[in-house]
């Protein structure tokens, strides 16, 4: 099992910044991808950004140039720096840990942290 603890959500004015953190613990995998997804009311959960254990990154088009994902492997922690926030970024943000076993891929989710951007 992998446990994920998120922090850093909150209320911010449009144009402002927030930084999300997610620390993973437990039975971790050497090959893994950590990332952030978000879900706004009435919408499906969508990818925001991911980063692999090899530091390859992937971003949703809507956040490119504004958000930066990074990780500290020594702390098993992933960060999402969110700049120039917009009201449409308002959502619950979920941390995801995808561990690649020899045969099976395992998905774990954090409890979610609310990000609210007001204009």
Image (cartoon, rainbow, N blue to C red):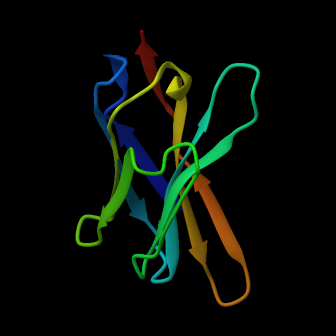
Q: Position of residue 8 (x, y in %)?
A: 31, 33
Name the residue nearer the viewer: 90 or 76.
90
Q: Is residue 74 above or below residue 38?
A: below
Q: Position of residue 66 (x, y in %)?
A: 39, 44
Which quadrant would the N terminus be assigned to in this image? bottom right
Which quadrant would the C terminus be assigned to in this image? top left
Residue drawn at the location 55% of the way across and 24% of the way down: 88
Does the rendering let one see residue 111? no
Name the residue nearer the viewer: 115 or 24.
115
Q: Position of residue 2 (x, y in %)?
A: 50, 60
Does the rendering let one see residue 64? yes
Q: Classify residue 18 by image quadrant.
A: top left
Q: How many marks?
A: 0
- Is 79 situated left or right of 110 in this image? left
Name the residue nearer the viewer: 27 or 29.
29
- Is 80 situated left or right of 30 in this image? left
Residue drawn at the location 51% of the way across and 36% of the way down: 93
Q: Residue lying farthest left?
A: 74
Q: Is residue 107 above or below residue 105?
A: above
Q: Is residue 18 above or below residue 34?
A: above
Q: Position of residue 105 (x, y in %)?
A: 69, 74
Q: Is residue 107 above or below residue 113?
A: below
Residue drawn at the location 47% of the way across and 53% of the way down: 3
- Is 52 situated left or right of 74 in this image? right
Q: Residue lying farthest top?
A: 119
Residue drawn at the location 36% of the way across and 53% of the way down: 68
- Is 53 situated left or right of 61 in this image? left
Q: Residue lying farthest bottom?
A: 102
């Amino acid at each position: 099992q992998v446990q994920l603890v998120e922090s850093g959500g909150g209320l911010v004015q449009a144009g402002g910044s927030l930084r999300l953190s997610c620390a993973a613990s437990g039975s971790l995998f050497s090959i893994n991808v950590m990332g952030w997804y978000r879900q706004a009311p009435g919408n499906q959960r969508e990818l925001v950004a991911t980063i692999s254990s090899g530091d390859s990154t992937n971003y949703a088009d809507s956040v490119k140039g504004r958000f930066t994902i990074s990780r500290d492997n020594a702390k098993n922690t992933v960060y999402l720096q969110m700049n120039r926030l917009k009201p449409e970024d308002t959502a619950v943000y979920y941390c995801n840990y995808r561990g690649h076993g020899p045969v099976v891929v395992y998905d774990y989710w954090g409890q979610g942290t609310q990000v609210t951007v007001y204009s």
